[in-house]
Image (cartoon, grey):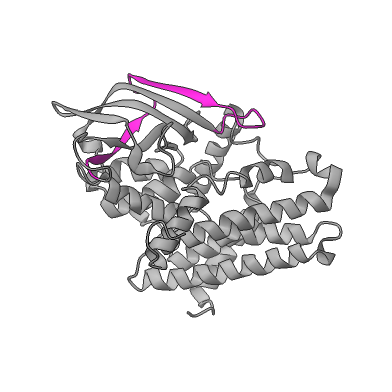
């Protein structure tokens, strides 16, 4: 693992830093969990795209600039260090897009990726159901074959970004007779389609960060099946690996939070702050190792669960330390919304209880039931 940046990498980093210094809004945008804030964040995505900075590692034909994976990590570090707005497009560019690159047809890539990069289309994740969250194989929503496509029916819940998004991606049971992990198919569908009802779910602060989706025989053409009929579980594991591993939570997020933490009154006398700063640096080094592995032809597997455990617990620890350091002032500080969001970390992307099971069984080789 080479930690020395090349001249090209440093030039890229400097370009990103300079652009962000000039363009990051001086005042924070409204919360992206509100209608007003969602629209403002979409406009920010479009501004990034105009500078060819919305999806730097994608091929140029889809709106990127063909940057290396290491350069993407450097971009993320600069992005968070600059205090730039949250990425309202993250479900699409960080979760669906890698899956499209791996499993999508040329037609799907051409239809969806450029609009995703430009902020024209914002995607929601439609996986969880009332009785199937981390146990994704337990989904009951169905896909029934009809002429030219499928009719989707069922209920999805905790669908992130769905309150204001344009499209969604999710799993449906296309063969009810198959075993749990089989007979699933991965679909892409618009949220304004006939038969789709979107019901926002208020967070603890009242903002609709999520929504329930009710689907009543929603027609989806065959060309919007991603990865093949009955191949949904295999395709979904590709998305989940990205969600838990590299792309969704880059070290830049935690490096910036750790730096902000050190600037609070009394922070340098608190061992938790020191631990958080060291942990953020460790996660950065571990990510460089992952980049080296992936660029060398490897892939993320069950170790993505370890990543998810690490960053979700680190996020909470840093925000709890900030809360204690600020005392009563915390409630009126910019840390509030990020603290509330950090509490969801051990739940989304597969609960940490499930991720510990994955690590125990697939990495340590422990038998089921021995934990």
Query: How many marks do you count on the picture?
Result: 0
Left or right, residue 322 beside residue 62: right
Q: Is residue 51 above or below residue 371?
A: above
* Relative depth, front residue between 363 and 164: 363
- Asked which quadrant contains residue 336, the reply is top right
- Asked which quadrant contains residue 367, the reply is bottom left
Report the span colored magenta.
Answer: 182-209
Q: Residue at x 41, y 33 (%)?
A: 129
Q: Where residue 167 sits: x, y (%)?
A: 39, 33
Q: Residue at x 34, y 36 (%)?
A: 139
Q: Where residue 94 sits: x, y (%)?
A: 44, 50
- Asked which quadrant contains residue 264, the reply is bottom right
Q: Where residue 267 sits: x, y (%)?
A: 82, 61
Q: Where residue 178 sits: x, y (%)?
A: 20, 40
Left or right, residue 28 beside residue 139: right
Left or right, residue 249 beside residue 259: left
* Relative depth, front residue between 207 and 362: 362
Q: Is residue 185 above or below residue 256?
A: above
Let me know if residue 184 is in the magenta part: yes
Left or right, residue 332 beside residue 213: right
Let me know if residue 207 is in the magenta part: yes
* Relative depth, front residue between 71 and 149: 149
Q: Is residue 70 above or below residue 184?
A: below
* Relative depth, front residue between 40 and 144: 144
Asked whether residue 21 appears in the rendered view, the answer is yes
Q: Residue furthest front?
A: 370
């Amino acid at each position: 693992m080479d930690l020395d940046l090349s001249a090209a990498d440093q030039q890229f980093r400097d370009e990103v830093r300079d652009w962000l210094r000039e363009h990051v809004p001086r005042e924070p945008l409204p919360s992206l969990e509100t209608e007003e804030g969602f629209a403002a964040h979409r406009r920010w995505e479009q501004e990034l795209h105009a500078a060819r900075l919305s999806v730097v590692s994608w091929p140029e034909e889809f709106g990127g600039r063909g940057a290396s994976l290491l350069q993407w990590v450097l971009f993320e570090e600069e992005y968070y260090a600059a205090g730039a707005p949250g990425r309202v497009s993250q479900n699409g560019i960080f979760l669906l897009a890698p899956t499209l690159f791996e499993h999508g047809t040329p037609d799907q890539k051409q239809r969806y990726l450029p609009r995703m990069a430009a902020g024209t289309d914002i995607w929601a994740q439609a996986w969880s159901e009332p009785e199937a969250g981390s146990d994704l194989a337990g989904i009951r929503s169905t896909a029934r074959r009809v002429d030219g496509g499928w009719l989707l029916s069922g209920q999805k819940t905790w669908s992130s970004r769905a309150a204001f998004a344009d499209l969604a991606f999710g799993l449906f049971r296309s063969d009810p007779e198959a075993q749990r992990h089989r007979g699933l198919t991965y679909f892409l569908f618009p949220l304004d389609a006939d038969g789709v009802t979107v019901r926002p779910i208020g967070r603890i602060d009242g903002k609709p960060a999520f929504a329930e989706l009710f689907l009543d025989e929603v027609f989806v053409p065959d060309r919007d099946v991603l990865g093949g009929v009955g191949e949904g579980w295999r395709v979904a594991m590709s998305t989940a690996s990205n969600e838990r591993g590299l792309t969704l939570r880059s070290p830049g997020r935690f490096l910036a939070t750790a730096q902000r933490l050190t600037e609070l009154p009394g922070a340098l006398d608190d061992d938790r702050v020191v631990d958080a700063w060291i942990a953020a640096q460790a996660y950065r080094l571990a990510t460089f190792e992952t980049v080296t592995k992936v660029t060398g032809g490897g892939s993320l597997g069950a170790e993505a669960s370890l990543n998810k455990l690490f960053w979700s617990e680190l996020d909470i620890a840093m925000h709890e330390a900030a809360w204690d350091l600020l005392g009563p002032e915390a409630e009126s500080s910019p840390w509030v919304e990020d603290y509330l969001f950090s509490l969801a970390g051990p739940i989304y992307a597969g609960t940490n209880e499930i991720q510990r099971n994955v690590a125990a069984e697939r990495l340590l080789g422990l038998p089921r039931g021995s934990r």
